[in-house]
Image (spheres, rainbow, N blue to C red):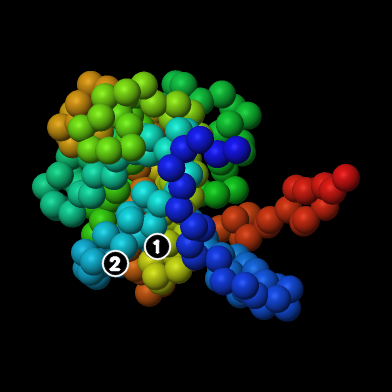
Amino acid sequence: MKDHLATPLPGYPDIDDAECLRRAERFHGIMTGRRTVREFSDRPVDRVVVEKAILTAASAPSGANHQPWFFFVIESPETRARIRSAAEAEERDFYETKAPQEWLDALAPLGTDPDKGFLEVAPVLIAVFGQKRGGPRPGDAKKNYYVPESVGIATGFLIAALHHAGLATLTHTPAPMSFLSEICGRPEGEKPFLLLVAGHPAADATVPLAALDKKPLDAVAAWI
């Protein structure tokens, strides 16, 4: 017996199996066209598109529905330059001293290096933060639960929403990322999760052939 307030479930029309399959196939077709992009156009992105994508991300499930995420959008060229400078300093340290050879070997087919020029070219950077405390309403200060898992799911929603809108994205995770908290002026109880680069791909953008190699269904799923 339910002992909490409830409301009828919205958003699930009664559709047949054939329509379910059509929807699944259509979305699969959209998402399999997504690729991580490192070559962006400086063409501006309509703010409303980014707002709608963030609202989609904010609809994700979360521990106790506390929604422990914050999305800080950076469009200012000066701030993007500061972020690039700080990120490249961390990346040089990573490639030169921190990364084990096995990791560097894994990255080699993707052609990555410490140069992160896309941080200044792409018109939108979204710094994603996880919150230690919060709650389902603005101003709450309760303990949040399953923060990395919740923020990771929301970030997946965000990437899917931006791709569906026709924008390219890149997940960037320099380590450490504490400079994002400082540059964005975020409070002590928030931790940077990742930096999402977004915009229109450059007209001559390419992707490494290695990035096209995705595992087949039987390598990533099983039924019992």
* Residue at screen point 39% across, 62% down: 162
- The residue nearer to you, when weighing 141 against 26, is 141
* Residue at screen point 29% across, 67% down: 49
Of labels 2 and 1, earlier in sequence is 2
Residue 178 against residue 119 in the figure, above or below = above
Query: Residue farthest to the right?
Result: 224
- Location of the C terminus by quadrant is top right
Q: Is residue 105 left or right of residue 5?
A: right
* Res. 208 in view: yes
Residue 41 percent coordinates (x, y): 30, 67
Q: Is residue 119 left or right of residue 101?
A: left
Q: Amino acid at mark 1?
A: Leu
Residue 127 against residue 55 in the figure, above or below = above
* Cα–Cα gap, marks 2 and 1: 8 Å
Tell me where residue 128 sits by quadrant. top left
* Residue at screen point 42% across, 62% down: 161
Tell me where residue 50 sits by quadrant. bottom left
Q: Which mark is residue 78?
A: none
Residue 82 percent coordinates (x, y): 17, 39
Q: Are marks 2 and 1 in contact (CB under 8 Å)?
A: yes
Q: Amino acid at mark 2?
A: Val
Which type of secondary structure does the marked residue at label 1 adopt?
Answer: helix
* Res. 177 in view: no
- The residue nearer to you, when weighing 116 against 6, is 6
Residue 133 percent coordinates (x, y): 31, 24
Q: Badge 1 is on which residue?
A: 162
* Residue at screen point 67% across, 72% down: 20
Which type of secondary structure does the marked residue at label 2 adopt?
Answer: helix
Q: Badge 2 is on which residue?
A: 49
Residue 219 percent coordinates (x, y): 80, 48
Q: Residues within 10 Å of mark 1 (few under 14, many from 20)?
A: many
